[in-house]
Image (cartoon, helix red, strand yellow):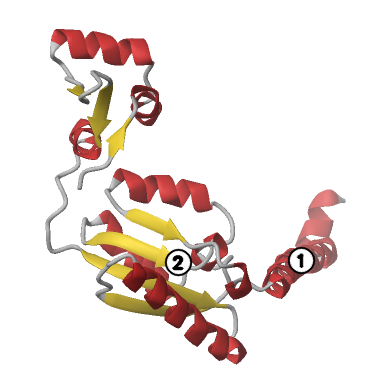
């Protein structure tokens, strides 16, 4: 079923004002639908057409995406998948694929995650189900969610806190500190090498 949006929601998605939508409706440029109560609404198909995106095909697949940071958390990965399958089954959703990833939520180069994004942006994915926002990506989730929404992908977050251990956040923050400390250390070594370079010294002299 095509998702419906209220005028203020649709205006925000298009980056225009509600008054602009009203003018487009009156002129026939972008006609609003009318509910039995005579309230105006818009559909996701209209949004896709406005963005110039082809309508998604009926053979798109639904996927469970589960992730842990380390291979030692294999049991948590199994628990994520089992919980999400139960969640999907309870809602009558058919899950076509299960993607399991091992890697930090800060890593934007996860092979399976990138392949899933590529399929989603190519119109091949209908729904992605994750246990928690940080299972999908640690930072920038809302940006990715909006991008997927613009392609007609339903990104469902179950918010199961037990499947998102707080310790992992600490590990990711430690990883950030390690990366920056390594860069600072490398910069110091580079500065020392420049200072000791005889060619540089001769020029400065």
Does residue 115 appear in this view? Answer: no
Q: Secondary structure at mark 2?
A: strand
Q: Residue at x 26, y 26 (%)?
A: 41
Q: Are marks 2 and 1 in contact (CB under 8 Å)?
A: no
Does residue 183 appear in this view? Answer: yes
Compared across the picture, whether 33 is left or right of 102 comes to left
Q: Residue at x 58, y 74 (%)?
A: 163
Q: Residues within 10 Å of mark 2 (few under 14, many from 20)?
A: many
Tell me where residue 59 sits by quadrant: bottom left
- Point out residue 184 in the picture as x, y percentages from the top left corner: 78, 63
Q: Which mark is residue 76?
A: none
Question: Quick one: 170 or 96, which is closer to the camera?
Answer: 96
How many dots with numbers?
2
- Residue denoted by label 2: 130
Placement of 184 over or under 33, stated as above or below:
below
Between circles 2 and 1, the one closer to the viewer is: 2
- Point out residue 165 in the picture as x, y percentages from the top left corner: 66, 73
Q: Residue at x 47, y 69 (%)?
A: 109
Tell me where residue 126 sits by quadrant: bottom left
Compared across the picture, whether 135 is left or right of 95 comes to right
Give the Cα separation between the discs numbered 2 and 1.
27 Å
Placement of 14 over or under 123, stated as above or below:
above
Compared across the picture, whether 126 is left or right of 90 comes to left
- Point out residue 161 in the picture as x, y percentages from the top left corner: 61, 67
Q: Secondary structure at mark 1?
A: helix
- Residue denoted by label 1: 177
Q: Residue at x 82, y 64 (%)?
A: 188
- Point out residue 151 in the picture as x, y percentages from the top left corner: 28, 48
Q: Residues within 10 Å of mark 1 (few under 14, many from 20)?
A: few
Placement of 113 over or under 23, stated as above or below:
below
Q: Choose the circle earlier in sequence order: 2 or 1.
A: 2
Which residue occupies the extreme front position in the image?
A: 37
């Amino acid at each position: 079923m095509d998702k419906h949006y209220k005028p203020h929601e649709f205006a925000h998605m298009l980056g225009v004002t509600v008054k602009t939508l009203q003018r487009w409706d009156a002129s026939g440029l972008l006609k609003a639908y009318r509910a039995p109560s005579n309230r105006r609404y818009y559909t996701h198909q209209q949004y896709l057409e406005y963005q110039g995106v082809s309508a998604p095909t009926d053979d798109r697949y639904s996927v469970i995406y589960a992730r842990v940071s380390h291979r030692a958390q294999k049991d948590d990965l199994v628990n994520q998948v089992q919980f999400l399958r139960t969640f999907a089954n309870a809602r009558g959703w058919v899950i076509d694929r299960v993607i399991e990833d091992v890697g930090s939520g800060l890593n934007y180069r996860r092979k399976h995650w990138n392949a899933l994004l590529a399929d989603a942006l190519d119109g091949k994915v209908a729904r992605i189900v994750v246990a928690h926002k940080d299972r999908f990506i640690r930072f920038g989730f809302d940006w990715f969610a909006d991008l997927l929404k613009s392609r007609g992908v339903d990104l469902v977050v179950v918010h199961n806190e037990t499947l998102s251990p707080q310790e992992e956040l600490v590990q990711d923050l430690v990883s950030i500190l390690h990366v920056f400390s390594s860069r600072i250390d490398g910069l110091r070594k580079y500065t020392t090498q420049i200072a000791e370079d005889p060619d540089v010294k001769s020029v400065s002299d």
